[in-house]
Amino acid sequence: MRKLILFFAFIGIVNAYAQQRPKLVIGIVVDQMKTEYLYRFSDDFSANGFKRLMNNGYTFQNMHYNYMPTYTAPGHASIYTGATPSVHGIVGNEWFSRTLGKEMYCTDDASVSTIGNGTKEEGEMSPKNLQSTTITDELRMATNFKGKVIGLSIKDRGAILPAGHFANWAFWYSKTGAFVSSTFYGEKLPEWVTKFNDEKRYMAYINKGWDLYRPKSTYNESLVDDNPYEGLLYNSSAPVFPYNLKAMYEKNDAGVLRSTPFGNDLVAEFAMRTIEMEELGKDDVTDFLAVSFSSTDYVGHLLGPRSMELQDTYLRLDQTIADFLVYLDKKVGKDNYLLFLTADHAGAENVNFLKENKYNVRSVSPKDIRANLKDFSMKTFGADLILNYSSFNLFFNKETIKNKNLDLNVVKASFKTYLMSQDYVKRVYTEEEILDASGNDYFLNFIVKGYDVTQNGDLVILDKPGYIEYQGKGTSHGTPYSYDTHVPAIFYGWNVKKGESYDKKNITEIAPTLAQKLKIPFPNGTEANVLEEVLKN
């Protein structure tokens, strides 16, 4: 009998490894998540959410972004393409395009329109600005378009860019409270999505309001509830619990849910409904569900990394992930899905918090930077030579420079000298320096990988560590410093051994690793460096 049991156990193991691909891949991106949160809040996490992933999966403790700017759209694109903005072309959330001579949004597409109960602008979106393929694209092609790919998020860019060019669907949240899409994906929403929207599940969260998830004493990893580093949620009188979301909703719209933990909860509900109604993971052809939890970013920006609100958001997200894993075990099967969790960027400490603790830094208003650049231009050249300053990029008006008979190289050198005299500036690089980079300059390497010559500026500015081009409340991100680049990366599930690594890894290694694990082609822009640790069964 013992030999028979061992024989059947052996056959089970052989069959498991003979299965070349999992039934379902789930990609989870937590917007603005610092690796630190896994540990700062760990005493208050359950055993079944983040801890289950870490204790039973493979954790990369030293995962980093390898380019600048560290923003949401480039982050999602880089995770899924295995490439940096210099290759995939998503150089910001929105940016001034040198080629077009105007501002553009990462997923703008005027050729498509909204489907579902959203505004006109909310659905004029597609992945057309993404210049390389994604791991989800490669899966679609490798399965002869039989494997389904669907992207979900509160943010349009968090759904569209991971889902890639060939996705069956991407859905994102409208300020009407509905999940919408665009005609890029279909002529009308699937009936089950319309039914989900008709249930108005967001209202249950709004009616309940936002109070602490745990007793107040739990939040001893955060600052006091009312502190000077927090912004106000929809003009509330003070940044303190409880929050009356119903009153905020009545004065605004259902978009208020985005800046609460319940945006994540609603996305998780929608993800589970998607798996059920689209029958993801039901057959032997691998499907892919890309989920992005955005509310962590909204809360972080407004209230900062040391607010009780942010800690509450992560405690609730921990439970949301725990519930989602239980659902996956039941619906797809514990050994049938491969899941990874990471973040699109991390985030800085609040600059005023640092300053009041004797770190000599400050917040720098982008509006003031533009005004000062214009003032310098007028005094030095007798004209405003600035076409645009945004996302650390400075663009010159070449037509004005030509009409004034000025030498562009002289203009660049003058502005570079001026900028280097500012207390917040660490380095300034010209387009020529970026394109001729030797690889020896640590910071320049980040800028090179984030620079698209057809879209970026004539000068790129690197601020000093700790400085933020942002308001004094909450926080922001975008730099090549570790507080913006260091993110969690956990693989869990199908054919993933338990373990951890402390070697430095790059975010662009996730997509090619998935390609190798799934035995499909690499995304076409990737350098194809892989995380060998999760390829070894």
Image (cartoon, rainbow, N blue to C red):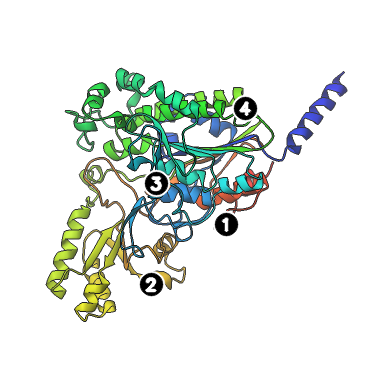
Question: Which of the two residues, 472 or 512, is positioned nearer the viewer here?
Answer: 512
- The residue wearing badge 1 is 524
- Compare marks 3 and 4 and give the one earlier in the sequence: 3
Where does label 3 land, which residue? 72
Above/below status of 355 relative to 307? below
Q: Is residue 194 above or below residue 79?
A: above
CA separation in Å, label 3 and label 4: 30 Å
Q: Please name which of the two marks, 2 or 3, marks the residue nearer to the observer.
A: 3
Q: Verify CB contact (< 8 Å) between mark 1 and mark 2.
A: no
The answer for how far apart the CA atoms under marks 4 and 1 are is: 30 Å
**Circles 4 and 1 in contact, beta carbons < 8 Å:** no
Q: Is residue 18 visible?
A: yes
- For label 4, the residue is 332
Indicate the quadrant containing the C terminus: top left, top right, bottom left or bottom right. top right
Q: Secondary structure at mark 1?
A: loop
Gap between marks 1 and 2, in whole Å?
27 Å
- Disc nearer the start of the sequence (2/4): 4
Query: Could you give the CA–CA distance between mark 2 and mark 4, rounded to whole angstroms?
Result: 51 Å
Quarter-of-image position of residue 196: top left
Q: Residue at x 23, y 30 (%)?
A: 252
* Residue type pointed to by label 3: Thr
Three-letter residue code for mark 4 = Val
Rendered location of residue 472, percent (x, y): 21, 44
For the residue marked with disc 1, what is the amino acid? Asn
